[in-house]
């Protein structure tokens, strides 16, 4: 279930609401593609044989890969009508709490933490936890900001 409002002006009324996304598999192919794109080719991400006897028991996703998937993991969780656009405004805090092993499934649980009117639109603060299927400890917790710009007629 998503958090939905008719317009950006409705966002302050739903501060505190939360929504949960669908499970998403983190494949070794995705990890390898991220390593290629960022040139971060540590063995803990790419060398399955060495990683099997390493500290995590297998290859793991880059923390920044998991973070970069927030738009995908939170897609559709906040629906705001009457919007011209929503743009990334930044991050206030990110904590990587547990590595995500290749083949694991993750999902986002996000809470609307704040909604502040600005001259450009509504600045929205989201607190998002990325859960790992079967694990009591999340992969990461991030406090993100976005600017939701109302449509003009």
Image: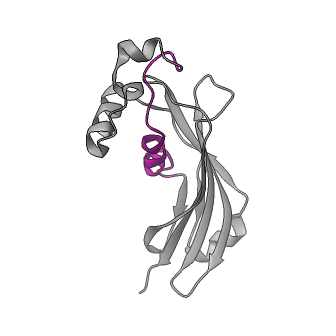
The percent coordinates of residue 89 (x first, y second) are 50, 69
Q: Colour mode?
A: one colour
Residue closest to the eye, 147 or 30: 30
Count of marks, rendered view: 0
The percent coordinates of residue 126 (x first, y second) are 61, 59
Q: Residue at x 65, y 71 (%)?
A: 115
Q: Residue at x 39, y 15 (%)?
A: 50
The percent coordinates of residue 18 (x first, y second) are 67, 51
The percent coordinates of residue 84 (x first, y second) are 41, 75
Q: Residue at x 48, y 17 (%)?
A: 54
Drawn side of residue 133 relative to residue 152, left or right: right
Determine whether 149 is above or below 40 in the image.
below
The quarter of the picture where the C terminus appears is bottom left
Residue closest to the eye, 79 or 104: 104
Q: Residue at x 51, y 30 (%)?
A: 100
Residue 131, located in which quarter of the rendered image? top right
Residue closest to the eye, 80 or 93: 93
Determine whether 12 is above or below 18 in the image.
below
Q: Is residue 63 magenta?
A: yes
Drawn side of residue 118 relative to residue 27, left or right: right
Drawn side of residue 17 relative to residue 144, left or right: right
Residue 108, located in which quarter of the rendered image? top right
Q: Is residue 68 magenta?
A: yes
Determine whether 81 is above or below 35 in the image.
below
First to last magenta residue range: 56-76
């Amino acid at each position: 279930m998503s958090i939905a409002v008719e317009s950006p002006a409705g966002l302050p009324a739903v501060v505190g609401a939360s929504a949960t996304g669908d499970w998403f598999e983190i494949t070794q192919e995705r990890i390898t593609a991220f390593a290629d794109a960022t040139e971060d080719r540590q063995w803990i991400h790419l060398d399955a044989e060495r990683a099997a006897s390493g500290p995590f028991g297998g290859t793991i996703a880059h923390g920044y890969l998991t973070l970069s998937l927030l738009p995908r993991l939170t897609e559709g969780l906040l629906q705001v009508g009457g919007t011209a656009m929503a743009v990334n405004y930044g991050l206030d805090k990110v904590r990587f709490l547990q590595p995500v092993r290749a083949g694991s499934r993750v999902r986002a649980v996000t809470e609307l933490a704040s909604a502040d009117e600005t001259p450009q639109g509504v600045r929205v603060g989201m607190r998002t936890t990325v859960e790992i299927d079967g694990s009591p400890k999340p992969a990461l917790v991030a406090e993100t900001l976005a600017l939701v710009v109302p449509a003009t007629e």
